[in-house]
Image (cartoon, grey):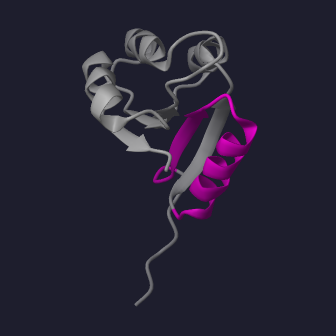
Amino acid sequence: MSTPAPTATDVKRIAIVDDHTMMREGVSTFVDSLDGFITAWQAVDCADTIRHLEKDVPDVIMVDITLPDRNGLELIKDIRMLAPRLPILVLSMHDEKLYAPRALKAGAQGYLMKD
């Protein structure tokens, strides 16, 4: 028996925050290829993220740590103020042992290495 396709209310909307276009587009393509997930929007920096969040809160947000205008760890704290229940997943190239505890302390729910 096959699994029914997800309905619009079942689809999880994922926002992607990364300053590298190739990374954003790659993650977006992957997310959109999964049943039950779509890319809600993409942002290139902290200011862009806040502008998007003020208009549209996704179901999950993926955040890089190194962003051009501010640190992603600071952005996590801002996201917590705007959307306290929004799940935050950090996707970063930075050493997990150093940055994961800091990201979790800032309010992220998970930390993934890009490699």
Please give left or right for residue 87 compared with residue 39 in the image: left
Q: Which residue is drawn at 25% across and 26% down?
A: 101
Work out whether residue 88 or residue 91 is closer to the camera in this orientation and state it.
91
25 up-or-down from 78: above or below: below
Determine the image quadrant of residue 16. Answer: top right
Residue 103: x, y in percent?
Answer: 33, 24
Residue at image position (31%, 27%) is 98
Quadrant including the N terminus:
bottom left
Is 72 situated above or below 19?
A: above
Q: Is residue 115 magenta?
A: no
Magenta residues, start to end: 9-35
Q: How many labels does the image show?
A: 0
Q: Is residue 111 left or right of residue 44?
A: left
Residue at left offset 49%, top offset 25%: 65
Q: Is residue 34 left or right of residue 100?
A: right
Which residue: 30% across, 21% down? Answer: 102
Q: Position of residue 77 (x, y in %)?
A: 39, 12
Which quadrant of the figure has residue 95? top left
